[in-house]
Amino acid sequence: MGTAIVLLILIVIVLFSIRGYLKKTRYGCCGSGGGEQRVKPEDRNPAHFPYEYEAGVENMKCQNCAVRVENAFHEREGFLAKVNLKEKRAVIRSKTPVPEEEIQRIIRKSGYEVRSVERRG
């Protein structure tokens, strides 16, 4: 009886593992179901954004992750962001000065860790 219960638990674990693996291979590492839809900022001209910050972002694994971080800024008025997934960094431009803590908060709210934030321009 005890062996049957252990065997049943192992089968359930294996099934969930296979399901998770298939989801990742189908939708990317986040399994987000077909990919993140890009949010396009109203103003896309970098010349209109005089303040520039660079943030180190941890735990991004795929392009869906990068788009999620960009969207977190593009959903707000006055931001333009571009993520370099390979270098795990984001360049964030803003129309007004933004405290570094606000940039950290936006990135964390999107689900990722912040390594650093530096003002560039």
Image (cartoon, grey):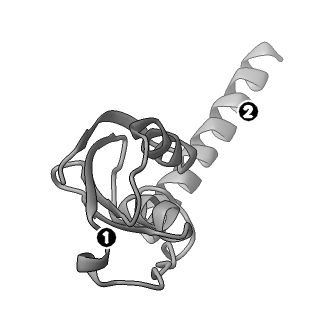
Of helix, strand and loop, which one carries label 2? helix
Vertical order, 2 against 67 (above or below): above
Real-space Cα distance between discs 1 and 2?
58 Å
State the residue in front, 80 or 121: 121
As drawn, is 95 to the left or to the right of 6?
Answer: left
x, y (%) of residue 81?
34, 65
State the residue in front, 26 or 44: 44
Vertical order, 8 against 120 (above or below): above
Amino acid type at circle 2 is: Leu
User: Badge 1, how many Cα within 10 Å: few under 14, some, many 20+?
Assistant: some
Residue at 46% in and 70% down: 26
x, y (%) of residue 57?
32, 43
The disc at residue 8 is 2
Amino acid type at circle 1 is: Phe
As drawn, is 117 to the left or to the right of 99?
Answer: left
Nearer the observer, disc 1 or disc 2? 1
Of helix, strand and loop, which one carries label 1? loop
State the residue in front, 98 or 60: 98
Vertical order, 86 against 113 (above or below): below
Residue at 83% in and 17% down: 1
The disc at residue 49 is 1
Q: In terms of sequence position, does the residue under pointer 1 or pointer 2 come before the other?
A: 2
The disc at residue 9 is none
Residue at 50% in and 72% down: 36
Question: Which residue ends up furthest to the top in the rendered image?
Answer: 2
Residue at 46% in and 35% down: 101
Q: Quadrant of residue 84?
A: bottom left
Q: Number of callouts in the render?
A: 2
